[in-house]
Amino acid sequence: MSLNMRSLSISSAIAACLVSPYSLALDAHVHGAAVLEVAKEGGEIEAVLRSPMANIVGFEYEARSAEDKATQANALEILKNANNILKLSASAHCLSDNVEVVLGHDDHDGHDDHDGHDDHDGHDDHDDHDGHDDHDGHDDHDGHDDHDGHEDHEGHADITVTYRFTCSNPDALTDMNVGLFDAFNRVEKLHVNLITDKGAQQFELTPSSNHFKF
């Protein structure tokens, strides 16, 4: 089978994983929990990790401050090194082909409307109410700038990372150790969906039980 066809087959297997109970559970966006979908075909492996962003960087709003941007950049660098996260049997000689990271924000559109509290500028129409200059104290609704500080409420955000490996000695590929818990200690539970030529399996990993067999 050609590499392209094999990749297509693996991607189809991953898509099948995405409707599993574990995957659907992540839709509830539970902090501390993440999902890993793994498909193995011959010496080709594709793994898709999905986690609430809070597990990885400690926040879910869009990084704006220099400190938050540095925290996020550091976390992404760790994620992009496949060997930090997924460790395959050494004797299988598996190399990471590429890593794709996608950040997704669910902006709770309504909060953008808090920008629309600038419409309280529309109180300028009440020139009669000089006192509404105090509704300049609606500048305190600039304290809806604190609705910037609804940064915590800017909605949920997830991180999706896709890892692909090619193993030159696939017969020696017997297990996978997950380094995610060591790299990001906010992750307490990892739901694994595994599809191989032997069929489908599901595991729940924790920091004290962080590996599974193919």
Image: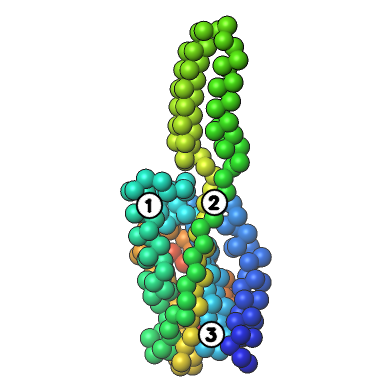
Q: Nearer the viewer, mark 1 or mark 2?
A: 1
Q: Residues within 10 Å of mark 2 (few under 14, many from 20)?
A: some
Lower sequence index among marks 3 and 1: 3
Residue 152 place in picture, x, y as percent: 47, 41
Q: 50 left or right of 63? A: right
Lower sequence index among marks 2 and 3: 3
Q: 4 left or right of 97? A: right
- The kind of secondary structure element at disc 3 is strand
Residue under pointer 3: 44
- Residue pictured at 45% horizontal, 22% vertical: 140
From the viewer's side, name the closer residue of 53 and 113.
113
Residue under pointer 1: 69
From the viewer's side, name the closer residue of 14 and 119.
119
**What's the amino acid at mark 1?**
Lys
- The kind of secondary structure element at disc 2 is strand
Residue 48 place in picture, x, y as percent: 53, 69
**What's the amino acid at mark 2?**
His
Q: Residues within 10 Å of mark 1 (few under 14, many from 20)?
A: some
Residue under pointer 2: 105
